Image (tube, rainbow, N blue to C red):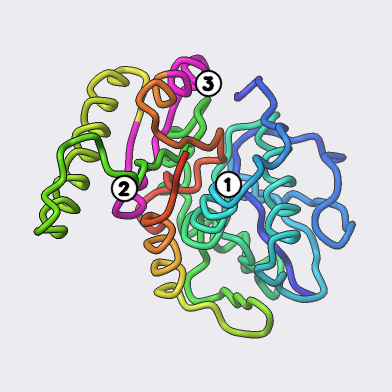
């Protein structure tokens, strides 16, 4: 039996906050003000869509009642002690990261790969491709300029995708703005991309 | 405290799945060196997911 970590929080969670994977009850491990939400699992879970969504469901349910730092999927320890050791050795970093994400969630924004309406140069497809990429960068830049105060933090996830940390009071406005720029957006996600230096 | 509960059902489609993979497998708090990840019994190498996300960059439409 292993211990699966879901999230770290500093809020007092209802101990009956439900089940984790394998229909096992969630438990809370504490160190000073920090709490790790865990459950026992027979094996580390496999990264299959149903399991990933189930794990995500547990974390989002917890997020409904507390600001938290989500754990990377399949973060397992051999004992409760390993988890509390994590809380102890990284106490400051985790507390700081929790403060950073408090009251906020993450949105994923992705630029469209379609070419813009700029005229093509048929004999030089590479040029057209580069022009399309640059135009998409402009779209994201304009979007970010308008999003301004709505965004608490940002980080790039890939060549065309970005993660934004957005206060819940701005969620609707942020989503509408992204759609207005024809950017693909998903969220709100737990703040997976904003858990601190080692995330 | 985030008082608005985030309980919307999983957004449909490949876009949500790729964003889910990117976040759950490449984000979040980690315990150094203590993660076993497998996909259908094949160890998932971080680089592979990077390539997957990059490939998805090239085809996304909305």
Disc 3 is placed on an element classified as helix
Structural crowding at the residue carrying mark 3, measured as other residues with C-alpha within 10 Å and reported as few (<14), some (14–19) or many (≥20): many
The x and y percentages for residue A104 are 50, 28
Q: Is residue A160 magenta?
A: yes
Depth check, mark 1 against mark 2: the one in front is 1
3D distance between C-alphas at marks 1 and 2: 17 Å
Circles 1 and 3 on the same chain? no
Instruction: Give left or right: position of A117 versus B41.
Output: left
Looking at the image, which is closer to me, B56 or A115? A115
Circles 1 and 2 on the same chain? no
Looking at the image, which is closer to me, A161 or A197? A161
Residue B25 drawn above or below residue A149: below
Contact? badges 1 and 2 (CB < 8 Å): no
The residue that mark 1 highlights is B16
Instruction: Give left or right: position of A103 versus A5.
Output: left
Q: Residue at x 74, y 49 (%)?
A: A28
Q: Which residues are magenta?
A: A153-176
The residue that mark 3 highlights is A168
Disc 1 is placed on an element classified as helix
């Amino acid at each position: 039996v292993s211990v699966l970590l879901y999230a770290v929080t500093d809020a007092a969670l209802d101990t009956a906050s439900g089940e984790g994977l394998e229909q096992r009850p969630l438990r809370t491990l504490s160190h000073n003000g920090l709490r790790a939400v865990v459950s026992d699992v027979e094996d580390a879970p496999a990264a299959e869509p149903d399991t990933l969504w189930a794990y995500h469901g547990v974390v989002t349910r917890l997020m409904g009642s507390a600001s938290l730092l989500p754990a990377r999927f399949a973060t397992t320890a051999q004992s409760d002690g390993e988890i509390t050791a994590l809380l102890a050795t990284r106490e400051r970093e985790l507390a700081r990261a929790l403060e950073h994400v408090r009251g906020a969630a993450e949105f994923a924004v992705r630029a469209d790969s379609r070419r813009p309406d700029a005229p093509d140069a048929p004999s030089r497809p590479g040029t057209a491709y580069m022009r399309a990429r640059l135009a998409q960068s402009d779209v994201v830049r304009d979007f970010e300029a308008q999003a301004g105060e709505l965004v608490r933090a940002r980080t790039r996830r890939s060549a065309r995708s970005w993660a934004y940390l957005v206060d819940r009071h701005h969620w609707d406005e942020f989503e509408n703005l992204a759609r207005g720029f024809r950017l693909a957006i998903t969220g709100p996600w737990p703040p997976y991309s904003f858990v601190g230096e080692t995330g | 405290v985030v008082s608005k509960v985030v309980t919307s059902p999983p957004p449909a489609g490949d876009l949500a799945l790729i964003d889910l993979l990117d976040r759950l497998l490449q984000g979040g708090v980690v315990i150094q060196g203590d993660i076993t990840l497998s996909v259908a019994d094949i160890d998932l190498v971080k680089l592979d997911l990077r390539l997957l996300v990059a490939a998805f960059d090239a085809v996304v439409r909305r």
